[in-house]
Structure formats: C-alpha cells, structure tokens
Amino acid sequence: MTRFMLLIATIVVSLTALEAQQLTLFTQYRDNIGILNPAAVESDFLAFGQNLNFGASYRSQWVGLENGPRTQTLRGSYLHTQGSGVSFMAGGFLMNDQTGPTGFTGIYGRIAGVVSPNPEESGFVIGISGGAVNYRIDASEIKLRDEGDLLGSTDQSQFFPDVGVGLYYYQMVGRRDDFFYAGVSVPQVFGLDLTFKNENDEFVTTRVQHYYGMLGFIKFLDRNGSSFLEPSLWVKYTQGAPLNADLNLRYYMPINMWIGAGASTAGNVHLETGVNLSQDYDRTFRVGYGFDYSFSSFGPTAGSTHEINLAFSLYRD
C-alpha cells in the first residue's frame, strides 16, 4: 500500500499506525546511492574515476493524483583515494519530502572508512550517516468527512535525530577495468512513533526501519571507457510491506548520452535518459530524466512519476 493511501487509512481509523515504504524512492537511484547507503561509492567514481561529486534532484510522484509525493535533494561527496590501508569518504545531503498534509526535511552528514590496498581498484567500505529530521503535518488539511478537523487548525512539527549505517564492496575485474559492486544498508536505524495531539484526539505515525540491498556491474564496451553497460538491482524490505526488487539496465553511449529501462516486482516500469554536457574527460556535468509508470492494481489511477537529476563530478587529489 502506498504512503498516501496508508495516510488516509490512518485518519479514518483515528489511531492506526502507519507501516509501509516510508522513505523516498528514486528512479535514477544510482545517482542518489549515497543517500540510500552511507557507505556507497558514487557511480561517477566507478564509471569515470571522478572522486568529487555534487548533485541535485527533483521528483514528482503520481502526477495524476492531487497532493502526490514531491521530493527535492541536494548532495555531495568526496572519496580520498591516495595510499593504501584505510582511506576515507565524506559527504552529506539535504532532503525535503512532501506528501499531502505530511512532510519531512532532513540534513545529514556521512563518513565512511575504505579498507583497501588500492582504493582506485577495490575497497570494502563501512559507513554511517547522521542528521536531524523535521517531521511536520498541516493539521488544517486533515479532516474526517463527518467530524471535521482531526488535529485542529494549528500546524505541528517535531524534530528527531536520525542515523543510517551501511556496508559496500567494489572490485575492478576483467581486462577493461570493469567494476562489480554490492552493498547493504539501513538508512533509517531509529524506529520512532510520531504523535501529534490536540485537545480531543491524537494522530500516530510509526516510522520503521528500511533494509536495502544493491548489486551492480559496469561492463565497458571499448578500451577508452567511453561506453558501458550497467545492470543493477535494488532490493527493499520494510516491515508491513512486501519485499520489493528493482532491476534496471543502463547503456552509456560513446556520444555522451545514455538510455535505461527497468521494472520492479511492485508492477512498475522505469525509463531513463540523459546527456553529459561536458566535453572534458576529467569532469562531467550530467542532466538525467527518469519516468515511472505503475501497472499494479492501484498504480494507473495514481498517474506517472517524473524525476530530474543534475550531477557534476571531477577528480581531485
């Protein structure tokens, strides 16, 4: 069941806890991999050798449904690749999500240790993220058909700390410097109950842990590394919701453009495309677009999903 429909069900029964997929979804999740796993190495490093990355994204989900989720992110990371033994990775991100009358805004930092004799070729990464999240509710927009306002007319908000943990492994393989990568993470370690009250009633939302797994392979198709195929898998599990898996394939062309497609066990299909606007091999400036459509029993009535992603990366000592 979707976040918005679960919210409506919660209001109808007054005190029902919300348990489902609560964290933000991404179509172009490889570009937001540091948000999903604090130990993850950015795809620009594996594909282009660039260790300093910045990005921004905007996602409008279920555009045919009024008050569908809207998400904005800003992110940045740096991977130190000099020397052997233990290197480090550091970064952070800002995220804002609004779904109907409820929303949250969080700011996070992340740091990771990279255990490797040569971090440019392989590494085992242990990472942690930490930050503060403001959960909010527009009380005037939550109403029962017969009883009027549930929480009165005063907007309410609460701040909570948040922590994420993750493991990640990447390895160069083959004669053309192909890369294999895999990771597991819990991006929201703390489970908590958000209770908003007024003089007559209360509204309780339960935040539960999410468990992610990722697997992928970058297969270069030429010797100069200007073209590659990248199959990838993103597995998601949340208590109270069925296991979900996204399988995707991206083809990066020699003309600095890429296309991709995929599907999920939830009945969604994904399409993506984008272009690298930079002509400098040492840096990239990419603009990507992602599109989702659901063929599940609920999906077609909710409309499609659109996502814009901007990314800038380069190599720095």
Image (cartoon, helix red, strand yellow):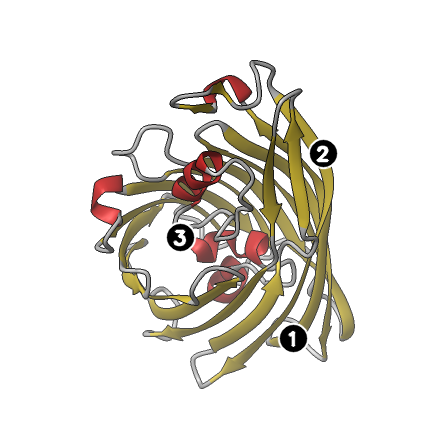
In the displayed structure, would residue 56 be above or below residue 44?
above
Inter-mark Cα distance, 1 to 3: 24 Å
- Residue bearing mark 2: 159
* N-terminal label among 2 and 3: 3
- Residue bearing mark 1: 123
In the rendered structure, are the residues bearing label 1 and label 3 in contact, judged by CB atoms less than 8 Å apart? no
In the displayed structure, would residue 203 be above or below residue 128?
above
The quarter of the displayed image where residue 171 is located: bottom right
| Mark 3: amino acid | Gln
Disc 1 crowd rating (10 Å Cα; few below 14, some 14-19, many 20+) is: many
Horizontally, residue 175 falls left or right of residue 251, namely right
| Mark 2: amino acid | Phe
The quarter of the displayed image where residue 230 is located: bottom left
Point 61% across, 48% down: residue: 207
- Mark 2 or 3, which is nearer the eye? 2
Residue 5 image offset from top left, x and y in percent: 38, 42
